[in-house]
Image: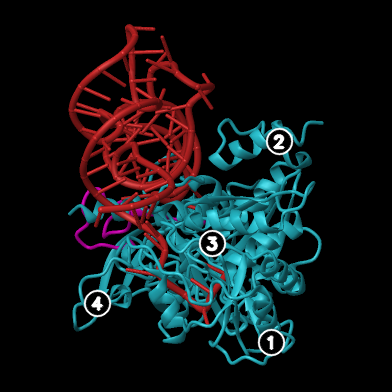
Amino acid sequence: MTTNESKTEKSSLNFIEQIIEKDLKEGKNNKAIHVRFPPEPNGYLHIGHAKSICLNFGLAEAYDGTCNLRFDDTNPSKENIEYVESIKKDIEWLGFKWHEQPKFTSDYFEQLYQYAISMIKAGHAYVCEQSAEEIAEYKGTPTTAGKESTWRNRPIDESLEWFEKMKNGEVEEGKMSLRAKIDMSSPNMHLRDPLMYRIKRASHHRTGNDWNIYPMYDFAHGQSDYIEGITHSICTLEFEVHRPLYDWFLDQIIEEGHIRPRQIEFARLNLSYTVMSKRKLLQLVEEGHVSGWDDPRMPTISGIRRRGYTPKSMRTFAEMIGVAKRDNMIDLGKLEFAVREDLNKIALRRMAVMDPLKVVITNYPENKIEHLPAVNNPEDETAGERMIPFSREIYIEREDFMEDAPKKFFRLSVGREVRLRYAYFITCNEVIKNEQGEIVELRATYDPESKGGKSPDGRKVKGTLHWVSAQENKQAQINIYDRLFNVEDPQKIENGQNFLDNLNPDSLKTITAFVEPSLGESRIGEHFQFERIGYFCPDYDSKPNQLIFNKTVGLKDSWAKLADKD
RNA sequence: UGACCUAUGGUGUAAUUGGCAACACACUUGGUUUUGGUCCAAGCAUUCUAGGUUCGAGUCCUAGUAGGUCAACCA
């Protein structure tokens, strides 16, 4: 068995896989792969996180390694347990399993504190009494060097003493901080004596009021990686400039014979027609532009789930977009392709009429109701059949009829014959209008010989329409979602505007539709294809007597494309 | 004008590390079809620019250009 050797089924490797295979080949880290997904529990996960989750957990799966889930909870004022729970749920939904129990950076607060003390003792850290403003001022700018703090060379004992007092809550918030002693003139801003600890009186969601000081990201992340034995610490590109600091901190604590984690950065996901920053997503929720974190228009994992996307489609998508270091803007169409591909294979076909137009079949008996068999999924024989009621009066889609139809219009028009899916051929012979001249009803005749939709004499009809019996159907509320923003990159804004000005006012349309009776039994978690329209799923609020469906994504529509050209 | 990073079709990712630029999405055209869906077939690139090395360069060298990240007691 060569599970630890290479990914044989894939012909090309991304740059991270190449690094890993090289490390494995060289026998680094005892030939083990141990990665981690380190979210901060201060918001809901979005599809960008999904990319990272698929990357990290996927790497662990591929190389017979392990992947930790670690909550990076060093900022008690922003984090809470609600987010912890939603993050766990999202990862599980995607189908991944973390190594052992979920881990928390707060589990290591005591160890981190000890590391800090030893650094003070070694002369690599000091307690600084500059204010936030002074620190910023002394820091300099990217193009000009900074100045050293006046507290930089205070005696070690004094720093030790004050750090202890900081910890014990004897120092006011903002009055002191612990800083690493590195290089105030470094061209890398992050090396200009970065903060290691700040005083915070907030209650932490796990450690309560045990601590009055909390470590900063840079002094917590690499250390946590080290403590957990992480081999490859994969993060996004904006942390690239942090890497020298990551390595510097590691140098201060590393011991002989221990695994030294390596930080590797990749480009975060950008998806067209949406935003991906937690801050902006939070704003959309808080200002009520969407109904919540799991609004099906949100790029959050919970939103996407409610929208009807499948875990498999998310993983396919992650596979499709790949991993690299250059900035990208992924076409939303790729995500839609991934979900259509999955849903096409698994979704049960049903008929539903969104915008009904009544058709009376004049030569069909008045009170007769036939139950006709219909295939559940042509892509999956095992899905079987169900029966659909057919009657003298039916509804078809309003847009499936046209009075002055062009040649390319394969649907219903006066004098034209079409097939009603799984039912009969009908020919339209009369249009009924109201006083305003609007079409309110169609009269048609059917060919009794064409039962099931098969032509009795081999004659062809070009069009097949979906339909629902006007007598036997269910009403359903349908939520039709469109892209949340009108422009590809909502963050690109004109002067004086903000990203909210790019919101698509028509991103949600709610209508009432007639659906075939079998949909009355649909359950949350199921996926349907409403034939010729798109994929839909029952919303969380859907009930048997009050059906609600969310549109996941439309079917590809080459007729709409053709019609658009005029 | 500092440091670091990145440049391959409309989009994303490859190219056995110097040897016929490949795969997917999108788009176009045609075929099949009881979903204008699916499926099948075909088409779609001067590898950011300019020089150079080489029998041969997306890959190496030189000089540019463009984009991104970094100045939170956030992560």
Q: Answer whether labels 3 and 4 touch (C-beta < 8 Å).
A: no
Q: Are marks 1 and 4 on the same chain?
A: yes
Q: Amino acid at mark 2?
A: Leu
In terms of secondary structure, where does tag 4 sit? Answer: loop
Q: Amino acid at mark 1?
A: Lys
Q: CA distance from mark 3 to mark 4?
A: 41 Å
Q: Nearer the viewer, mark 2 or mark 1?
A: 1
Residue in the image at 38% along x and 71% along y: A484
Q: Which residue is mark 4?
A: A497
In terms of secondary structure, where does tag 3 sit? Answer: loop
Residue numbers of the magenta segment: A400-423
In terms of secondary structure, where does tag 1 sit? Answer: helix
Q: Quadrant of residue A77?
A: bottom right
Q: Chain of mark 4?
A: A
Q: Nearer the viewer, residue A131 or A237?
A: A131
The crowd level at tag 1 (other Cα within 10 Å; few <14, some 14-19, many 20+) is some
Q: Which residue is mark 3?
A: A182
Can you tell which chain is drawn red? B
Q: Which mark is residue A24?
A: 2
**Left or right, A111 with reference to A48:** right
Magenta segment includes A95 = no
Q: Which residue is mark 1?
A: A165
Image quarter where the C terminus of chain A lies is bottom left
Percent x, y for residue A509?
39, 77
Percent x, y for residue A529?
53, 60
